[in-house]
């Protein structure tokens, strides 16, 4: 047991139920910044913010125009002028990779936020209501969860068509069960807390209890799921693009399609068109999973007890 | 569970806003053909009638007839059965790679807790899990097929005469034929796809085995064994390891969902003629019955796998009773 743990154990529990959502998130993050989990979280957060920066300022950061074919010599290996080389139709790989960050984060944001908006409230209601409603919802969500997410997303993408927004919607179906599950399980345990019972005894109505008492407590689990599902969403979106089900050809940047295009040139030793977009995906997904797993260690009280 | 999965598939294909037939043709066919196709498939009838027809089809094993260019006139089931062995071969091979690599790394990490090698193992587990499968496949192709020339990069078989089809599994067929040379060619073709998919999946096993090993090492019976003077190595191999595997097998089922999804990507990277590439062909060819059939077969596979896992779990852990 570390010093920090024992100090916390002596403090009164209600002092630990603090403040705002951000306070509850960043308080432990700051306190545990020297532990392995803390360091990983901060590295992950840094990488994520760097990608957001890249995505927002893509037009300024990309050295070349990246969609017009044959604006540069084709298949140039990396050089000072083309830091990551050019592809088979003469597009600058670096510029495409930078714009890819924007596309990728857009899709991820659409997918993950819709999943949150659906999964979180349903999870709250299901956990609070219990009984038959709960059992049916859990069964449905578990079945969706057991099915290969990529297949389901591919199917939906094929039905609703290509494009950034459509792909975002298509991958949503994978993450709704995830948010649902976590929210529901948290709700189940929070529902039995004395303060919820106190609220009920004071005559608070169910909606009030659910949305201001329970949600307030349960929402702290969301950042963990957010990071992990965001990493997965980026992989899935790239996978759909790779399969040719994702985005239109003229999308300003698309890592999955670039990797798919690059494949036919591997045989003749053109490595830069596949290596760099892949590394961009990996760095971002690794960053997000560092953040997610770090946060999970820090915020999840069960794990914390187990570590002690 | 099967019923719910099938219902979800039905829901996705029919009820979600958007017109699957029109979307699949993507403007390549005149409106009259779209309309005819829809009528021929009974998609212009009310949902509940469609749903009953759909369930009836599945449980009689009649999945319809292909309407795509490639398999026109063949029954969906026969095409699917031709493709299925390739995917199962890939899946089994990948699972072997994943469990071997994952259990070994997890064991090494768990035994050397918090030493540098453990930190490396944990990083491996996290990073390998979020590497895009197709990218890893391309890199492995680049290294082992293009630069080193050790292994073939594409397909299931390269010589002129593939093994005679008996079971459809090339590895089994070549042995049944008594042709070791064909068996070796088959394994060479399996190597890179299985390595790709297996490595990505291994990260999960690394993490779970490590975490469970740490949990069992702290258990009372391990302490008791230690008190009796049994060496640490023996405790790990004889006591802790087996118990650490039980929770891994329980969550194995969910890994198959990732496995089948990943197999679609792997099949594309290595031009592997399995279910995944069939599904893509059907989506691009607007072959609606084939798409539906492929998805139904995937659902069946998921359910079969989870039943098998439940049985295995019961065999390994005598406490589990159904």
Image: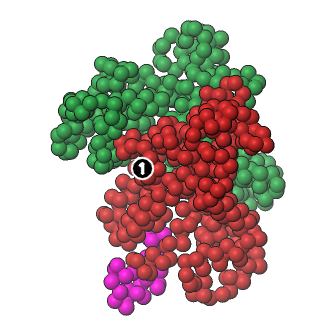
Residue A50 location (% of width, % of height): 67, 60
At 54% from the left and 62% from the top, the residue drawn is A226
Q: Is the residue A213 above or below the residue B186 in the image?
A: below
In percent of width and height, residue B206 lies at 67, 48
Q: Chain of mark 1?
A: A
Part of the protein shown in magenta: A185-209
Q: Would residue B40 be counted in the magenta stretch?
A: no
Q: Residue at x 65, y 28 (%)?
A: A265
Closest to the observer, A157 or B319: A157
| Image mark count | 1
Q: Which residue is mark 1?
A: A166
Q: Nearer the viewer, residue B121 or B314?
A: B121
Colour setup of the view: by chain
Residue projecting furthest to the front: A71
Q: Please name whichever residue, B23 or B143, is drawn nearer the observer in this view of the structure.
A: B23
Q: Which residue is painted at 34% across and 31% down in the image?
A: B28
Label 1: state its secondary structure.
helix
Q: Main secondary structure of the magenta part?
A: helix
State the residue in front, A291 or B245: A291
x, y (%) of residue A214?
44, 77
Q: Write the residue at 37% across / 69% down.
A: A125
Is there any visible trace of residue A52 in the rendered image? yes
Where is residue B279 shown, x and y percent of the image? 43, 32
**B106 in relation to B113, above or below:** above
Going by the image, does B293 lie left or right of A46?
A: left
Q: Residues within 10 Å of mark 1 (few under 14, many from 20)?
A: many
Residue A201 within the segment the image draws in magenta: yes
Q: Would residue A21 appear left or right of A199 to someone viewing this image?
A: right
Chain A's colour? red
Write down the quadrant of residue B197 in the picture: top right
Hey, which quadrant is residue A161 in on the image? Answer: top left
* Chain in green in the render: B
């Amino acid at each position: 047991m570390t010093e920090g743990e024992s100090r916390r154990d002596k403090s009164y529990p209600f002092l630990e139920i603090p403040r705002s959502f951000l306070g509850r998130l960043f308080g432990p993050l700051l306190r545990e910044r020297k532990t392995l989990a803390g360091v990983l979280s901060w590295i992950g957060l840094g990488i994520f913010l760097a990608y957001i920066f890249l995505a927002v300022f893509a037009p300024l950061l990309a050295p070349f125009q990246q969609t017009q074919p044959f604006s540069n010599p084709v298949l140039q290996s990396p050089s000072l002028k083309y830091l990551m080389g050019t592809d088979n139709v003469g597009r600058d790989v670096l510029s495409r990779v930078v714009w890819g960050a924007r596309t990728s984060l857009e899709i991820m944001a659409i997918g993950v936020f819709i999943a949150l908006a659906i999964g979180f409230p349903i999870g709250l209601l299901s956990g609070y209501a219990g009984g038959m409603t709960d059992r049916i919802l859990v069964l449905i969500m578990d079945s969706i969860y057991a099915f290969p997410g990529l297949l389901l997303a591919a199917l939906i993408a094929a039905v609703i068509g290509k494009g950034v927004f459509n792909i975002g919607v298509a991958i949503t179906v994978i993450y709704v069960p995830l948010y649902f599950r976590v929210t529901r399980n948290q709700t189940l345990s929070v529902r039995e807390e004395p303060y919820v019972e106190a609220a009920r005894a004071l005559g608070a109505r169910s909606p009030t209890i659910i949305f201001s008492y329970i949600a307030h407590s349960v929402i702290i689990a969301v950042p963990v799921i957010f990071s992990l599902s965001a990493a997965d969403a980026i992989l899935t979106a790239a996978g759909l693009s790779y399969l040719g089900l994702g985005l239109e050809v003229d999308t300003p940047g698309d890592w999955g399609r670039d990797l798919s295009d690059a494949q036919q040139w591997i045989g003749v030793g053109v490595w830069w068109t596949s290596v760099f977009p892949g590394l961009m995906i990996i760095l971002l997904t690794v960053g997000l999973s560092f953040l997610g797993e770090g946060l999970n260690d820090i915020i999840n009280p069960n794990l914390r007890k187990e570590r002690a | 569970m099967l019923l719910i999965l099938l219902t979800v598939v039905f829901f996705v294909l029919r009820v979600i806003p958007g017109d699957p037939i029109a979307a699949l043709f993507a403007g390549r066919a005149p409106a009259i053909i779209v309309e005819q196709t829809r009528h021929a498939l009974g998609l212009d009838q009310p949902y509940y009638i469609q749903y009953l027809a759909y369930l009836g089809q599945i449980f009689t094993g009649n999945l319809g007839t292909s309407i795509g260019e490639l398999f026109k006139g063949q029954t969906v089931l026969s095409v699917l059965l031709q493709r299925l062995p390739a995917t199962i071969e890939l899946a089994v091979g990948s699972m072997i790679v994943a469990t071997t690599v994952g259990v070994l790394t997890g064991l090494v990490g768990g035994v050397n807790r918090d030493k540098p090698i453990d930190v490396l193992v944990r990083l491996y587990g996290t990073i390998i899990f979020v590497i895009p499968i197709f990218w890893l496949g391309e890199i492995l192709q680049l290294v082992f097929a293009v630069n080193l020339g050790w292994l073939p990069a594409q397909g299931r078989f390269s010589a002129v005469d593939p093994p005679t089809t008996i079971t459809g599994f090339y590895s089994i067929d070549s042995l049944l034929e008594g042709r070791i040379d064909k068996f070796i060619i088959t394994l060479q073709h399996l190597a890179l796809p299985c390595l790709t998919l297996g490595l990505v999946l291994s990260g999960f096993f690394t993490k779970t085995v490590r975490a469970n090993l740490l949990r069992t090492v702290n258990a009372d019976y391990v302490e008791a064994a230690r008190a009796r003077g049994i060496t640490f190595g023996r405790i790990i191999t004889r006591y802790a390891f087996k118990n650490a595997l039980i929770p891994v097998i329980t969550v194995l089922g969910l890994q198959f969902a990732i496995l089948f999804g990943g197999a679609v990507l792997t099949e594309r990277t290595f031009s592997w003629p399995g279910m995944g590439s069939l599904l893509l062909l059907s989506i691009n060819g607007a072959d609606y019955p084939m798409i539906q059939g492929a998805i139904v077969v995937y659902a069946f596979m998921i359910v079969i796998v989870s039943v098998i896992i439940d049985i295995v779990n019961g065999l390994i852990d005598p406490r589990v009773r159904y």
